[in-house]
Image (cartoon, rainbow, N blue to C red):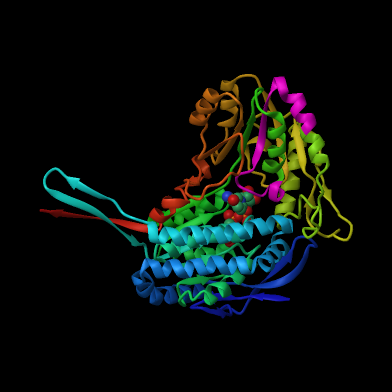
């Protein structure tokens, strides 16, 4: 049994209340770890440590901060296989995918290590013989709360810029997948990150997460998770005037025009639908296909999906691993039932899978449903699993109305060879990110986030560095 304790002031620390949560391996549906059940007292300890560490961390030359953060990036790479194995066991995702994500977690640190030395502020010369310059100072102690779908990747996506900008961090990974964040703390120690600069607490969102959001000395909250949780966090943090960055759910359209390269569109749509069991906020869960190519696309997609293997995350032939938790597994299955009630036809999948030797794990076959109205619940609510729907359209206007017709606006994908149409659509889609003839092609410098109920604020590049700093204007007359 693995024990996951808090990491406070550079030391693994038992929970104040002495209680632990069960950590599950979703591939076999069994408990394999115990996770510190943090409360407000633990968060207070973490804040105290962060407060003590802050003056020296803030004053450290950027060049030295760069070296430490870069050493963490190297530490992740040096432990890539161990981290990837832990991620797959905790989350259920295929091991080959975990390896890619660990690489990306390392890149997050490397990227923001360099941001620490390249981040520059603006200056403005005023006609009335004055010069203004902007001081960008760290916010202080910041809270980073991350979800269970891309555990270490999204954890580092927040803490790396927070640290690079000179803040001290109190972070909480999801209680479903805390293992790699726990391992990262040891890597941070080896990289000589001073004690108290990064503190990691564990436990339930409603207790430990809530204590972070409520703490008066935590000045900014960066959160990725469900829209309902984001709404609640905003209601607590906004009256305290905290800076807030919320990256929430999505119901992303994947639009295939009749002039698209169908082979490419099919190949990529298999990934954008089912990668990581569909548990990525950027997955395209509503696939809109032009009537002229609907049948051809559908046939080719079904052929590809039929080849997908569901099962053991450590089998290298596995495409789709286990769903992260029993509640999520049940939620996804309930949406498949709802889709049937709403009149949908299940073209493939639509059921749980019990792979040999893994009968107690939480697996769901890649599921494609057609024949549903664009406005039904299945087509407007986030499912967050290996389930997509197919819809047909005739005109640009029609598909835009349907694509924009949900409360969400995170990412959209479109497939067309018509340049003018691509630009027109990119402009009109209500979405924080638009991919044209590709999906999940990431550049860490670009703004990342959503509109409408998909969130507030942007992460990535300078956006993240700006979020984690407080701008102060200094005006000097001469
Ligand atoms: O996420 P939660 P859940 C969506 C997806 C999923 C649904 C629910 O549709 O089915 O959300 O997932 C912490 N104060 N996404 O319930 O609760 C929690 O401990 C402070 C989309 O597992 O939002 C965890 O660390 N923190 C998403 C984190 O919030 C709180 C990824 C996320 O958990 C808290 C995950 C509180 N009161 C789920 N309550 C995406 N956008 O990628 C919970 N937390």
Q: Which image quadrant: the N terminus? A: bottom right
Residue 64 in picture, x, y percent from top left: 41, 70
Task: Please give the count of numbered marks on the rendered protein.
Answer: 0
Q: Does the magenta stretch include residue 353?
A: no
Rendered image quadrant of residue 305 = top right
Quadrant of the rendered image holding ligand 1: bottom right
Which residue is found at the position 54% from the left and 76% from the top?
190
Q: Which of 296 and 173 is in front in this view?
A: 296
On the rendered structure, is 375 left or right of 158? Answer: right
On the rendered structure, is 64 left or right of 278? Answer: left
Is 219 drawn above or below residue 262 in the view shown? below
On the rendered structure, is 63 left or right of 2? Answer: left
Q: Can residue 80 be seen in this view?
A: yes
Residue 143 in picture, x, y percent from top left: 47, 63
Q: Nearer the viewer, residue 199 or 264?
A: 264
Magenta residues, as a range?
275-300
Which residue is found at the position 36% from the left and 71% from the top?
60
Q: Is residue 93 visible?
A: no
Is 208 drawn above or below residue 410 in the view shown? below
Residue 472 in picture, x, y percent from top left: 27, 56
Is 348 drawn above or below residue 60 in the view shown? above
Q: Is residue 277 magenta?
A: yes
């Amino acid at each position: 049994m693995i024990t996951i304790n808090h990491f406070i002031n550079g030391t693994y620390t038992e929970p104040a209340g002495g209680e632990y949560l069960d950590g599950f391996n979703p591939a076999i549906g069994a408990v394999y770890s115990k996770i510190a059940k943090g409360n407000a007292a633990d968060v207070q300890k973490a804040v105290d440590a962060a407060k003590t560490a802050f003056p020296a961390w803030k004053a450290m030359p950027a060049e030295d901060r760069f070296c430490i953060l870069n050493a963490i990036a190297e530490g992740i790479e040096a432990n890539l296989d161990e981290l990837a194995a832990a991620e797959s066991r905790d989350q259920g995702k295929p091991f080959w995918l975990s390896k890619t994500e660990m690489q990306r977690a390392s890149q997050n640190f490397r990227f923001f290590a360099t941001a620490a030395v390249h981040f520059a502020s603006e200056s403005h010369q005023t006609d009335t013989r004055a010069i203004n310059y902007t001081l960008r100072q760290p916010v202080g102690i910041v809270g980073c709360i991350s979800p269970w779908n891309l555990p270490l990747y999204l954890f580092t996506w927040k803490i790396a810029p927070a640290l690079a900008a000179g803040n001290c961090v109190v972070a909480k990974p999801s209680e479903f997948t805390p293992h790699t964040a726990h391992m990262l703390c040891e890597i941070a120690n080896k990289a000589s990150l001073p004690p108290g600069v990064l503190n990691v607490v564990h436990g339930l969102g409603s207790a430990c997460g809530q204590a972070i959001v409520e703490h008066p000395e935590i000045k900014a909250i960066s959160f990725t998770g469900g829209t309902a949780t984001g709404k609640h966090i905003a209601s607590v943090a906004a009256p305290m005037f905290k800076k807030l960055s919320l990256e929430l759910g999505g119901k992303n359209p994947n639009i295939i025009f009749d002039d698209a390269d169908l082979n490419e569109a099919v190949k990529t749509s298999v990934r954008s639908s089912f990668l990581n069991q569909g548990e990525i906020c950027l997955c395209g869960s509503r696939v809109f296909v032009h009537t002229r190519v609907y049948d051809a696309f559908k046939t080719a997609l079904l052929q590809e999906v039929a080849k997908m293997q569901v099962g053991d995350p450590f089998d290298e032939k596995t495409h789709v691993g286990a769903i992260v938790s029993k509640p999520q597994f049940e939620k996804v299955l309930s949406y498949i039932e709802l889709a049937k009630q709403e009149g949908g036809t299940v073209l493939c999948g639509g059921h749980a899978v019990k792979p040999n030797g893994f009968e107690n794990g939480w697996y769901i076959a890649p599921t494609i449903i057609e024949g549903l109205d664009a406005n039904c619940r299945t087509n407007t609510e986030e499912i967050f699993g290996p389930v997509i729907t197919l819809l047909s359209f005739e005109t640009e206007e029609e598909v835009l109305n349907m694509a924009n017709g949900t409360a969400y606006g995170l990412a959209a994908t479109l497939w067309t060879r018509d340049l003018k149409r691509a630009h027109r659509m990119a402009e009109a889609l209500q979405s924080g990110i638009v991919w044209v003839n590709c999906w999940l092609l990431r550049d860490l410098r670009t703004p990342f986030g959503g509109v409408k109920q998909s969130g507030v604020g942007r992460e990535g590049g300078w956006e993240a560095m700006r979020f984690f700093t407080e701008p102060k204007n200094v005006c000097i007359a001469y």
